Amino acid sequence: MEMSFDKMILSAEDEMDFLPIIPLNETDSDDNGGIEIPAEIALLPLRNTVLFPGVVLPITVGRDKSIKAVNDAYKADKLIGVVSQKDSSVEDPGVNDLESIGTVARIVKQIKMPDGGTTIIIQGKNRIAIDAIVSENPYFKAKISKIEEEEPPTDSDFEVYVATIKDLAAEIIQLSPNIPTEASIILKNIENPAFLIHFVSSNLNSDIREKQRLLEINSIRERADILMQLLQKELQFAELKNKVANKTRTELDKQQREYFLQQQLKSIKEELGGESNVQEIKEMQKKAETKKWPQAAKEHFKKGVERLERMHPTTPDYSVVYNHLDLMLDLPWNETTEDVYDLKKAKKTLDIDHFGMQKIKERILEYIAVLKLKGDMKSPILCFVGPPGIGKTSLGRSIANAIGRKYVRLSLGGLHDESEIRGHRKTYIGAMAGRILQSLRKVKTSNPVMILDEIDKVASDFRGDPSSALLEVLDPEQNHTFYDNYLEMEYDLSKVLFIATANNIQNIQPALRDRLEIIDLSGYAVEEKVEIAKRHLVPREKELHGLKDSGFKIADKTLEKMIQDYTRESGVRELDRQLASVMRFQAKELAMKGKLKQVVAASDLEKILGKPRYSNEIYKTANMPGVAVGLAWTYVGGDILFIEASLGEGKGELKLTGNLGNVMKESATTALTYLQSTASKGVVDLKLFDKKTIHIHVPEGAVPKDGPSAGVTMMTAIASAVTGRKVKPFLAMTGEITLRGQVLPVGGIKEKVLAAKRAGLKEIVLCWQNEKDVQEIEAEFIKGITFHYVKTMNQVLELALVR
């Protein structure tokens, strides 16, 4: 059984009310040129309702024929002919029970119900005439012709018709308590006269025959005239109903009574000695006189104060308005700090605070140079990407010091509520501004250096997506009109120098990533770590442990041994912890013995820190056929990994273990296929592949591994196992392979090379296209490593396998 959704859920009494059906988009009704109406179309007979063009209706479909028609239409072009029954009491209508004029509709949504029925949401598109029924099974199918709509008249008489229809409908809505007030807002915003007539006609409580009559009339003027007559009848009925309902209502409602009492209380307090809030309002106004802010903010504040003066301090809204005005006064609208344009001083400040990081320092100096020449520019949105512990966050404070700006840090790790960025609407209890404006309120300047820490760890849930809210904040073309929900007006963020930090750029959504100027930071070499320890870490740890005046030193060789044997990281956090252990040992020695050794030597480390945690001896013991050393990139920096291959009795299968991802598994398959294809050239024995099972394992099975860069290492390991030739000791390799035996370039070269250097490896095999990446690394950091640049896998095997 089909019926209008609103008729299905309302009682008989409620059906008399004017209940609007909200359109999806008014313009959709005008934009039917793009819809191709077929010559034949499936028909959906409706009971108790008429569908007009442009109007959206939810329909419950129950008949088997109708369900079949809807399903077929939804799978095809989603168009269906909707026609009303002449008699709504007929359960199974025939050809003669259908009206000759209907509407072609688009099925917007189809919902399967638990009872087997179907609910659809349809939108009328165009009136159609049914020329002939061509099929009745499995559902009605008819030849149709499109009825062209005439253009609405532009004369003043017709405009009066339209205005009268709006006024009558608005009066009916006002008099009917069961109709939401939003309905009148919808009516006021309908501009298209034809759609207005369709929309109001659809929601009339008139007889279905009257609605069908309105649908069949071609003249818009005549249709409007009949609709006005029907609305007049509806209005008379609503007025009569409202008169009966209000006959006994003679008392003032509660809200009006409370208002009068509050006014009386206000007058009494004024007589007794003045209002308690007069003084604080005067203080706000005095503070506002000296405030440098835009004209729009000034007017907004003035209206808020006027509203505050009319309110009593005990009313709940008083504190809401007061807090809002207080925020406006505290925000630094046009208050800025003066930038320092001394490039030499800025460079010196950056060099003192951080060792290395030349790329970032150059970028900041370029920014200061442009500011010096131009006087003003939009601040860039920088993003420092690199492993943990290399000083990304602390670099932000150093930049602020270098250019003479204030520094504020905003931690985004684990943030999952959009309101934390944009603020809450002040109608909510406990509402407050977003953290961007709160930070500016705290530093009292509109041009600070703002660190957006851990931007790659922003979460999202049902409360919104903060990373989407950041799109406006971090777009130089938009952030001068940043809108905070609590402030309820635009605020200029274009003077703020935003610096984001991240460990893994892949976790940042693409639209946000596009707005950031990415600056990659690599891990530190051993030599850099020694310098950082001498300049920054050791002096700081001495001071923290009360050893500032003790005079002892830590030798460079000691620091180097600590870095190589007790840490495996790209940054210096673990090194800092190891130095803290040394300082605690020294503090204990000084407290117990009263004196210290002047130099902490490398030989003392085992006594202080215990046995070395890491050793390079593993590369000597692992020197057997089938074992190759690869280089990997992780978000904490570079690392080395072993790839083991062995042969066993079997039927030529390939087994892969070690928690490998799909890309890594495909690399192993590619390597095996290439070796099989080259077996005929005498590199390996082809018969081995038929009789032996090849097993590839990557140790540390609990750690997920993926990526194409282990392709050459897998190939070498398999070739070593098959030929019985060992891989050259202290040699590592990285690169992607193809079925044709070519070696392709990979990323993260600096991190991988530094990881190999930390691990004590002496030779590295790379794709020839990665040579440019190696050249970017300072020569002193990779001293003692020999690089082999290759183009094909044959070159790799010649270099790697011992003869």
Image (cartoon, rainbow, N blue to C red):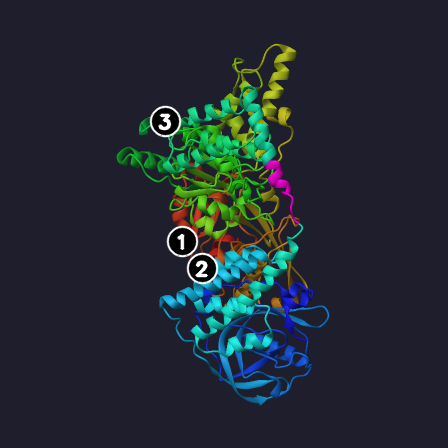
Q: Say whether residue 248 is magenta.
A: no
| 351 lies above or below 424 | above
Give residue 156's position: percent from left, percent from top.
Answer: 36, 66
Of 648 and 562, the residue lying toward us: 562
| 287 lies above or below 79 | above
Instruction: Say which label, 1 or 2, has the lower sequence index.
Output: 1
Of 310 and 439, the residue lying toward us: 310
User: Where does label 3 land, which residue?
Assistant: 348
- CA distance for labels 3 and 2: 47 Å
| 369 lies above or below 483 | above
User: Where does label 1 land, which residue?
Assistant: 769
**Residue at 27% from the left image edge and 36% from the top image edge:** 374
View extreme (right): residue: 115
Name the front one of labels 3 and 1.
Answer: 3
| Disc 2 residue type (three-letter) | Thr
User: Where does label 2 land, which residue?
Assistant: 792
- CA distance for labels 3 and 1: 36 Å
Look at the image and tell me whether residue 747 can be seen: no
| Disc 3 residue type (three-letter) | Lys
Name the front one of labels 1 and 2.
Answer: 1
Q: In the image, which residues are magenta?
A: 249-259
The N terminus lies in quadrant: bottom right
